[in-house]
Structure formats: C-alpha cells, structure tokens
Amino acid sequence: MNTDTTVPLTRIVLASRPQGEPTADNFRIEQAPLPSPGEGQVLLRNLYLSLDPYMRGRMNAGRSYARPVEIGEVMEGGTVSEVIASRCDGLQPGDVVLAHGGWQTHAIAEGRTLTRKLDAGIAPLTTALGVHGMPGFTAYAGLHEIGKPQPGETVVVAAASGPVGATVGQIARLHGARAVGIAGGEAKRAYVRDELGFDAALDHRAPDFADQLRTACPNGIDVYFENVGGAVFDAVLPLLNDFARIPVCGLVAHYNDRALPPGPDRLPMLMSQILTRHLTVRGFIQRDFISLYPQFLREMGGWLGEGKIKYREDIVEGLENAPAALIGLLKGRNFGKVVVKL
C-alpha cells in the first residue's frame, strides 16, 4: 500500500445548503497540505468512502439526531483507512481500520476511536462499510430490538435491494419469517427475489403496486421496516396487522422536500391506526443499540462465512465523483451499497 506522506490532501466540503435536491454546486473540492498527527493521533489515508442516504440530512441546518455539516466543512462519512503515520500505541503504519475519515483522501483521527482493525484475508475491506458495517448493523439492530420477527410472520421492507433492506429481508428469513421486498425496477426486483431469496419482490413503480402488495401479504403485515416513506407507506398502512411493529430507519422519499406534501392532513388517520391497531412505530439510528455491535459482528461474520447472507456493492471510482454518486443514490440510481474507491 502507498504510504507516501508528501502528497497533498484532497477534500470535498459543503459549499452551500441544498434547496430541495442537491446539485453539484453544493459541493466544492479543495486541496491542502497533509496535517501531522499529535500525541495519541494517527494520520490516515482513506481507501474507501461510504455514501449513505443520511448524508442528505446532514447537509441541512437545524436540529436532527446529529449536528449538521457546516458550510466549508468536509462532508462527513465512514471510511476504510490505512494508517500512514502514528503517534498512538497499538496502531502502526500499514494497519487498516474502520474510521470516520469523511470525504477526503487523508484524515487525522484519535487513535482511541479506531477500535476495529480490518483484515482483507477475512472479508473484503468494503464489507466494513456495508453488510458487515453500519448498514448491516442498522438492519440487524432494528429487527432485533423493534421488529422482533417471529416464525411465520410477514416482514415487508422498502428499498430491498439496498444495503439495509437486503440485509433486513435475509435476516428475517433466518428467523423463519416471510420476507416481502419492495424495490424500483425489474432488475432490482429480480435480484431481491432470485438472488437474495425473498419470498416475494415487488416493483413500487408498477401502476397496480398496492394490489400486488395485498396479494403478496394475504395474512397482512406484521413488521414493516421503513426506509422510504411516501407512496410505499401509503400502500403498507391498510395491511398492517394488530400489534405490527414499524422500525423507522429512513424516509428517503422525503429528504429533498421543501414543504409539506399537498392534500388533506392525514396525521389524524395515522394516529387513529396507531391507536386502534396497537401499532409500535419507533424511529432509530444504529447507535441507539450500540451494545449489540459485538454480537452483530460475530453473527454476521458467521452468516457471511456460511453464505447465508448475500450482498451487492456499487463501486464508484474517484473522490471527485462522490457528489454525483450521492445525488444518484438519493434518486435510486444505485444498485447495492455505494462505495467510493479513493
């Protein structure tokens, strides 16, 4: 691996806050000298960058579950990174770690935060950003703590070809539940059904999608893992069984909204359904259940080794292409976990 510390740092910063859909003008590419690590720190060369839907929310000002990226700051994101200089005991040049290096070629990190070393001989490095990392853990934790699928129950998941949704359905089947996946387009639908082994897979773009969903769930829906919102949730809501559980992981259909959707206020109807059907609706992020992370690493590692969990990656070459890749991800253009190879 290249350990040259004389090359400049290249980074992508937030140039302006989006008004609706992000554009290339919301990002700016910069170069700077490489920083030197202080006591207890390491200098990282980022090898792979994860792109995820939550990044759109971090581009907005205002209160959320994490502080926004400020104008002029490096866009944030998880990375697989190589240590190229260290002033931290236990980390040496050449070590490869899971980090939070952001949208840049190099980063300074506190050594104490780099608790997971990676070995390409055990699993591909990129899986630490996908199925064996944050997206996989999000699926695992949301199902384990909120969804709680039981044998014979029906689990429906939106964005089922993506890294979270694909993992949700496969874990649900390992628990003996039926898995119904919702994706966009025939290629993704076929992948969910034929390669991932879901019991049924539907295209939300189909004009009769709501009817197809009803047919695929003859006994109703016991768990709906929400990644999307919008028209998909509208089709799911009438089919929810009493005591159904809804882990709310994402609402990508609404991330670019600039105002409330048109039409009548449907909140009273939703609240009525929550009351009369005894629904559990809980929003979460993966760190809410971080105590499960060691258990997840063990179980997912075993499932991957045994071929019980499959995954797909969408590799983008070059940091300069990260903005376009994120914009495409938010429009559903990706197929699998989006990873930028730096």
Image: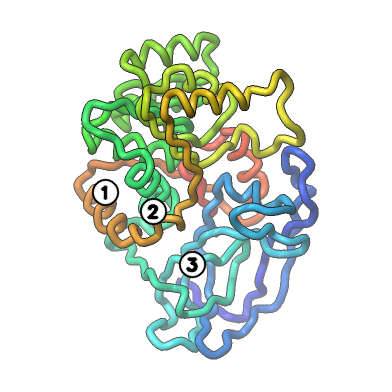
Q: Is mark 2 on a helix, strand or loop?
A: helix
Nearer-the-camera pick, 319 or 70:
70
Q: Three-letter amino acid code at disc 2? A: Thr
Percent from the top left, x then y, of residue 285? Answer: 49, 51
Q: Mark 2 points at which residue?
A: 127
Residue at position x 36%, y 15% in the image: 216
Q: Which amino acid does label 3 sit on?
A: Ala
Q: 322 left or right of 131?
A: right
Secondary structure state at the residue bearing disc 3: strand
Left-right relation of 22 to 285 = right
**Label 1: element kind:** helix
The residue pinned by badge 3 equals 99
* Residue type, numbered disc 1: Leu
Which part of the image, by quadrant, shows the N terminus? bottom left
Q: Can residue 20 be seen in this view?
A: yes
Task: Give percent across and percent down for residue 339.
Answer: 51, 50
- Name the quadrant of the C terminus: bottom right
Query: How is the protein colored in the picture?
Result: rainbow
Residue 248 x, y percent position in the rendering:
49, 39
Q: Are marks 1 and 2 in contact (CB under 8 Å)?
A: yes
Q: Which residue is located at x 19 percent, y 47 percent?
A: 306
Instruction: Decide: few, some or many residues near mark 1? Use Cα within 10 Å; few <14, some 14-19, many ≥20.
Output: some
Q: Position of residue 202 (x, y in %)?
A: 43, 20
Write the residue at 60% across / 66% down.
105
At x 52%, y 25%, the residue is 233
Residue 304 numbered tag: 1
Q: How crowded is mark 2: few (under 14 residues within 10 Å), some or many (20 or more)?
A: many
What's the CA distance linking mark 3 and mark 1?
A: 22 Å
Looking at marks 3 and 1 on the same chain, the residue that comes earlier in the sequence is marked by: 3
Closer to the camera: disc 2 or disc 3? 3
